[in-house]
Image: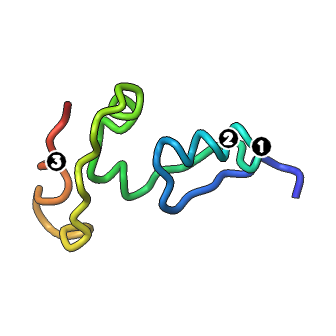
Amino acid sequence: FGGPYIVNERFDKASANAALASGKADAVAFGVPFIANPDLPARLAADAPLNEAHPETFYGKGPVGYIDYPRL
């Protein structure tokens, strides 16, 4: 495979940076952390704690699990 390699699945800031620095990945995608942290880039930049995701609310009806996670 000769194209960009994007990794995903259970990365945090430290492991994402390690994958990028080692050349094991060209980019890191964050899925679930973005659902619970709509301000994820700001949180990572500030070394702020992340909100805990509540998977039981994913893909449901209404605002719970979509717009009720606190921002910085």
- Going by the numbered disc 3, the residue's amino acid type is Tyr
Of tags 3 and 2, the one toward the viewer is: 2
Marks 1 and 2 close (CB-CB < 8 Å): yes
Residue drawn at x 26%, y 52% is 36
Earlier-in-chain disc, 3 versus 1: 1
Marks 3 and 2 close (CB-CB < 8 Å): no
Residue 53 in picture, x, y percent from top left:
25, 59
Residue position for label 2: 20
Residue drawn at x 82%, y 49% is 3
CA separation in Å, label 3 and label 1? 33 Å
Residue drawn at x 66%, y 47% is 19
- Going by the numbered disc 2, the residue's amino acid type is Leu
Q: Secondary structure at mark 3?
A: loop
Q: Secondary structure at mark 1?
A: loop
Query: Relative to residue 16, is residue 31 drawn left or right?
Result: left
Query: Relative to residue 47, is residue 11 drawn left or right?
Result: right
In depth, the one of 14 and 31 nearer the eye is: 14
The image quadrant that residue 1 belongs to is bottom right
Quarter of the C terminus within the rendering: top left
Residue 27 in picture, x, y percent from top left:
64, 43
Residue 56 in picture, x, y percent from top left:
20, 73
Local crowd size for mark 1, using a 10 Å CA cut-off: few (<14), some (14–19), many (≥20): few
Residue that lies at the very extreme toward the right in this rendered image: 2
Local crowd size for mark 3, using a 10 Å CA cut-off: few (<14), some (14–19), many (≥20): some
Query: Relative to residue 5, is residue 14 drawn left or right?
Result: left
In depth, the one of 19 and 38 nearer the eye is: 19
Residue position for label 1: 23
Q: Secondary structure at mark 2?
A: helix
Residue that lies at the very extreme toward the bottom in this rendered image: 56
CA separation in Å, label 1 and label 2? 5 Å
On residue 69, the disc is 3
